[in-house]
Amino acid sequence: MPFTFKAAQKAVSVFIFVGIFSLLTVVILILRGSEVLQQKIWYYTILEEAYSITSGMPVKYKGITIGKVKRLRLTSDRKVSLDFYVLKEYYELMQENSVLKVQTSLLGGASLMLVVPLEESQLLPSGSLVLSMDMPRGREILALVAQQQPAKDDLTARVKDVLDGVIELKPTIQGILANLQNTTGELNLIVRGLRTGESTVMSDKLLASLANLQDITKNLKELTLLLRSDNNTVGAFLQDKKQLYTKLESILGSVDKSLQSLSKVSTKLETTPDDVKQLTSLLKDNLIELRAVLQSLRNILGGSTSSPSLKQGERK
């Protein structure tokens, strides 16, 4: 008697087959959307130092990711050799006069940018050395490209630089805000539990400091709203700059007040539980970092006021 599948077995087999087929389809679609299945062309360059570049960092051209850094290694003459790839669809950008430039951000981070002159040259084959900003020829080309770029309106260029710096600082401020909220909440609960007997006076002082910190976090939330990235125009900047600067000054004043208060309280925490001491120290560290970031932001905004045209724009 020949072997036959029962109806239930057939249904299960169909479901298994459909499931496997669907899974394979999803995997293929995901891989096609990523760089795994895309053709890559490999190159390398030489830098004087690593400039905070790490493996996996994107290589960009005009803000578009065209490749990634694979690895960095030290050469025999103590320079940094950087291996990277470029996706095949951007192969035409890899010319003999293309230059890799490391762009350093306000907070010390770095990104790798490809600069391609207007004058075309021969394409570089796979495995070739790409000019870098640390090579004499690379510096010459970068200087030539800078001369060829059209001059921008002074006000527009200045405001764009300010906005770029402001947007760079926004994630850092939001991160510090989250840390302050978490640490303040934990410390608040612990200190309220200590309000018995001799510890009441010290607890009240610490609670007063925490109340001031809550005002800081509230102001920080308002500041992050002012640092919105969806309205980055010259007109919007001129309209909001005064409000932003005023808010900054207010928060910096509150931060200094909180640091002074916490410093006074910290000197009298010898008999306080270790978790309170640690959280208080963490709060101080966060406030010091916040003050440094906000001062950088204030310097960015304040630096733009040296432009006469910008001052005229504010009065309108």
Image (cartoon, helix red, strand yellow):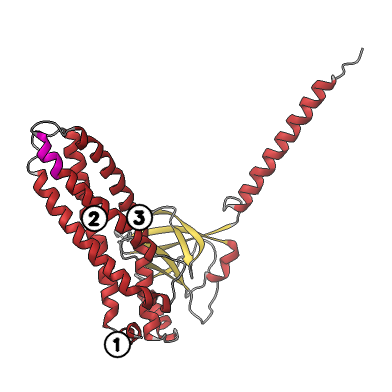
Question: On screen, 223 above or below 300?
Answer: above
Rendering quarter of residue 125: bottom right
- Secondary structure state at the residue bearing disc 2: helix
Q: CA distance from mark 1 to mark 3?
A: 32 Å
Rendering quarter of residue 253: bottom left
**What stretch of residues is rendered in magenta?**
199-205
Q: Nearer the viewer, residue 172 or 219?
A: 219
Q: Amino acid at mark 2?
A: Glu
Q: CA distance from mark 1 to mark 2?
A: 32 Å
Callout 2: few (<14), some (14-19), or many (20+) C-alpha neighbours within 10 Å?
some
Image spot of residue 156 (x, y percent): 40, 81
The answer to whether 121 appears left or right of 178 in the picture is: right
Q: Main secondary structure of the magenta part?
A: helix
Q: Earlier in the sequence, mark 3 or mark 2?
A: 3
Tell me, yes or no, if residue 205 can be seen here. yes
Q: Nearer the viewer, residue 28 or 69?
A: 28
Q: Which mark is residue 174?
A: 3
Q: Nearer the viewer, residue 173 or 43?
A: 173
Q: Are marks 1 and 3 in contact (CB under 8 Å)?
A: no
The answer to whether 265 appears left or right of 190 in the picture is: left
Image spot of residue 310 (x, y percent): 33, 83
Rendering quarter of residue 145: bottom left
Q: Amino acid at mark 1?
A: Pro
Q: Residue at x 19, y 39 (%)?
A: 278
Location of the C terminus by quadrant is bottom left
Q: Amino acid at mark 3?
A: Gln
Q: Residue furthest top?
A: 1
Question: On screen, 167 above or below 118?
Answer: above
- Secondary structure state at the residue bearing disc 3: helix
Q: Earlier in the sequence, mark 1 or mark 2?
A: 2
Q: Which mark is residue 308?
A: 1
Q: Nearer the viewer, residue 126 or 92?
A: 92
